[in-house]
Amino acid sequence: MGSAELAASPPAVASQRARGARTSAIPLLRAARPKQWTKNLLVLAAPMAAGVLDDVGDLERIALAIAVFCMLSSATYLINDVRDREQDRHHPVKRRRPIAAGALQPRTALAAAGVLVIAAFALAMAVHWQLALVGACYLALTTTYSLWWRRVIGLDILTIAAGFVLRAAAGGAAVHVGLSRWFLLVTSCGAIFVVAAKRYGELREERPSAPSRHSLGRYSARTLQAILALAAAGAISAYILWTTTRHLQGPWYALTIVPVVLWLGRYAGLVAAGGGETPEELILGDRLLLVVTLAWTLLFVSALYVGR
């Protein structure tokens, strides 16, 4: 009887471990925040502006670059959630995050983050060393943000915005496309606009029972509204100036200005109505924003390939 129990024990232990692995896989995936991978579509921006999306080899490199940034961003989310788990437990929404809720152990999360970082840099080096360099800059930026910059008013917004710009730069690095000053200016202003809107949404939703994060308590609604207005004006002005540098026939580039203005105006209206705290949910959840985005994409593709 005893020997039979011992003989049956290893399979039982293996079965328990398998169940445990499956149980932790779902919280791990949730903690990686796949919904926020949509931000990494910014990698498409530079190759699209350069008109190289019709090259199969470039498309493969772009897809790999997006995968690299999905892994790097998920790694930073895991590290940040481990670091902030005590604060998150006091937040009405963030307390449901797997690490704060106790569904995912910090040790498991950190191990997964390490694996993601190693895999991301291995994949980036397989594409091009410049992509690995941009990835390293992104990882350094997000790490220092978590440690220092999120507590400094102004720099917290600029740091997050720089993360968006690095995503756009990654696309250029993957397919060897240079980034013009107008492209960088449009991307930077657009990123500041979205991040300032996020801060504005957080400020409106702040509750006394939830400890204030970053430098949020030092911002006022009026200050963030001013940043939103300046960033939107900068993005529109730079975009208009950029379209004038495109020496192609036809009205297509000029027509793309309309959906850009409509998109920024609609987004600002949704932020004023109480949105903006979660940009990915706001964008994906609003039909008009999606329609305007599609219209811009169709017009821009027409400018690239029809207007030649």
Image (spheres, rainbow, N blue to C red):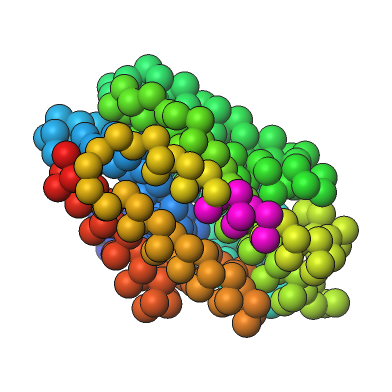
Q: Quadrant of residue 149?
A: top right
Instruction: Kindly tell me whether residue 64 is visible in this rendering.
Output: no
Relative image position of residue 48 (x, y in whole percent) = 29, 41
Furthest-top residue in this view: 129
As drawn, 156 above or below 255: above
Report the residue at 39% width, 64% height from top. 259
Count the labels in the image. 0
Relative image position of residue 20 (x, y in whole percent) = 40, 60
Foreground pick, 254 / 53: 254
Q: Quadrant of the N terminus?
A: bottom left
- In this view, the residue in front, 99 or 301, is 301
Give the camera-side residue of 224 and 41: 224
Residue 128 appears in which quarter of the rendering? Answer: top left
Q: Which residues are magenta?
A: 229-236
Say which residue appears at 80% left-offset and 69% top-offset: 221
Quadrant where the C terminus is found in the figure? top left
> Which residue is drawn at the image coordinates 64% and 64% (left, top)?
197
Residue at the extreme bottom of the image, as rendered: 273
Magenta stretch: dominant secondary structure: helix
| Location of residue 162 with respect to 19 vertically, above or below | above
Residue at image point 67% right, 60% down: 228
